[in-house]
Amino acid sequence: MEPILNIDNLKVSFMTSNGEVQAVRGVSLSVGKGEILGIVGESGSGKSVTSMSILHLLADTARIKEGSSIRFDGEELIGAPKKRMREIRGEKISMIFQDPMSSLNPLIPVGKQVAEMLLEHHKDISKDEAKKAVLELFAKVRIPEPEKRYKCCPHEFSGGMRQRVMIAMALANKPELLIADEPTTALDVTIQDQILQQLRELEKEYGTSIIFITHDLGVVAELCDRVIVMYGGLVMEEAPIDEIFEHPSHPYTMGLLNSIPDMEQDKAVRLKPIPGSPPDMTNPPAGCPFAPRCPYARKICGAELPEFTQVGEGHSSRCFLLYPDAPADDNNPFRREV
Amino acid sequence: MSEHNILEVKDLTKHFKAGKKQIVHAVDGISVTLGKGKTLGLVGESGCGKSSCARTIIRMYDPTSGQIILDGTDITNMKQKELKPYRKKMQMIFQDPYASLNARMTVRDIIAEPLLAHNLVKNKEEANDLVYPMLERVGLTKEHANRYAHEFSGGQRQRVGIARALILEPQLVICDEPISALDVSIQAQVINLLKDFQEEKGLSYLFIAHDLSMVRYVSDDVGVMYLGQLVEMSEADEIYRNPLHPYTKGLLGSVPIANPKLARQKEKSSMEGDIPSPINPPSGCRFHTRCPYARPECAQTTPELVDVGNGHRVACHLHKA
């Protein structure tokens, strides 16, 4: 699959009164055309900051370090002029967020807000044409009674309906890439299911690539083609969807999978949580950021950062225990019998 | 009232006024019982009334009608003063550990406050003798006692909230979405802590959450709520294995499965539409507007919650005893 987006060695820090918060510390990833890439991680893992960097949506306190590169369709976005970014936003790359209420203008009818997207990028279409296109979009994202809903303000909508408006807006110009940052986290499972199904259909129909950011492994399993697991501002593991669930190859990924109960979970057996809490990014650990919480950590893990080891087709993981010279003792979950 | 039950709720109703002459039917005729040392899970979409139900049970809201019996005593219409000794028996853990802890109090003071409010200790020094062991019990240390809530992570704050609720040694703890604001890796820590306490002290939990697999894991019985009413109630495994109400089926079918192969095989049966407004709930069965099996009678008569065997109760015209 030819990549539409290539992020290379992205480093982003925030300058705060407590010092430099190293939110993203060298992330490289790519998204193929028509691919749905999941980015999984907990709060503070750097997943949102990575995605916000793409469209220049970071706060003023953010600094993108030298050597970072974000190439979209061959074009370098870091350092791109404001005017060019305005053209790209909404036209080529769109984004939807967790809280649709704070992304919509509360005073303007939703139909008009979506129409703005079309009018902004196409100087040649009339307002009537834009309205017609919006009504079609509303029908596509299954907003009932589009004509009536066109004139409603956001507060008259439920959370799920607002998120549909956001999706309609994001897709108005048939972008090549859609970035969805926890778009279903605030929604009920029933509504989440409807939205996921829609995203799947839209991806098929338009061939839009999607970056889907979430902390919910279930959502990833239902939607994504490939997954990137982030922790402490770094990519820890990258794998095709089936691989990550069948052969998780990083202790953090394994910990995540172990800590969620499935519908078959034996109630008498305790869950296996990951002990401790995520690292403080003003002073990130010198070695593997997961080492302080890792049940398999060795001396070297706290001192040096491991490189990626290829463990399968399109599957790589950043862990010393996968190194060929790693000791194959009982405390190595990856030891393979030769 | 059986002495094995810590809580019996009969036909509980809570209506809120909304503007002129409009009434929000938040809770409409809920009856549940919770055995000592057991966990009852309540699930449903936002707006189904599960939190209002919990808050009415704990008498944060005054019930409109119905009966709440806590450990054999009817507390439905007690005045606040009379209620005070019973408050010790029931405590609550809240969803948002950022909003439910006083930002200007140290962790020690937060945990000691219930002890002082109920005159269980004479002064703060005496309270410390109870606060320190409790801190350690929830996985924090003595050193954390003098810090403020903002210095803690979400998971640690929720531990403080748990310590505050459990320091009074209550018999009933209402957990209103206790883990939904936490990271996945932290959720299991908190759940294990709650389970440990239950085993140790014989606590009963009323556990409200929208994470259905977690509810199944912690609960003995599960009730499914829709627009203020119970539509199905059963032993936890039974309801997940053999859901009868179309709403329960839809709800369970919407849960994402953390297994891509199974997820692909899953029948796609998305539930249509949103939950209607509780101001003018639909007539008859309140679910009929979204139900794929609705028949004319569903819009006319409200189905009763009937036992269809083995204590599995369901309110649906398709399932009669």
Image: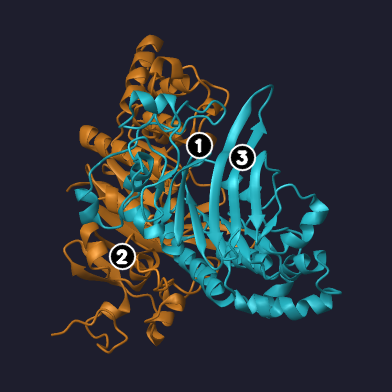
Chain colours: A orange, B cyan
- Which residue is labeled 3 in the image? B13
Task: Kindly state the secondary structure of the residue where label 3 is placed.
Answer: strand
Q: Dot 3: few (<14), some (14–19), or many (≥20) neighbours within 10 Å?
A: many
Front residue of B225/A316: it is: B225
Q: Nearer the viewer, residue B263 or A95?
A: B263
Distance from the alpha carbon under mark 3 to that under mark 1:
12 Å
Please, is residue B60 above or below residue A201 in the view?
A: below
Does residue A45 appear in this view?
no
Question: Which of pointers 3 and 1 lies earlier in the amino acid sequence?
Answer: 3
| Res. B227 mark | 1
For disc 1, the neighbor class at 10 Å (few under 14, some 14 to 19, many from 20) is many
Q: From the image, state whether disc 3 or disc 1 is nearer to you.
A: 3
Residue A262 point in image, percent of width and height: 34, 61
Classify 10 Å Cα crowding around label 2: few (below 14), some (14-19), many (20 and above): many
C-beta proximity under 8 Å, tags 3 and 2: no
- The location of residue B116, given as percent across then percent down, is 81, 68
Q: Is residue B57 above or below residue B190?
A: above
Q: Chain of mark 3?
A: B
Q: Is A28 placed above or below A131 here?
A: below
Three-letter amino acid code at the position of disc 3:
Thr
**Is disc 3 in the same subunit as disc 2?**
no
Q: Which residue is mark 2?
A: A237
For the residues labelled 1 and 2, the Cα–Cα distance comes to 43 Å
The residue shown at (31%, 32%) is: B292
Q: Chain of mark 1?
A: B
Q: Are marks 1 and 2 on the same chain?
A: no
Q: Is residue A306 left or right of residue B133?
A: left
Front disc: 1 or 2: 1
> Residue A326's quadrant in the figure?
bottom left
Give, as a three-letter code, the residue at label 2.
Answer: Glu
Residue drawn at 81 percent across, 55 percent down = B82
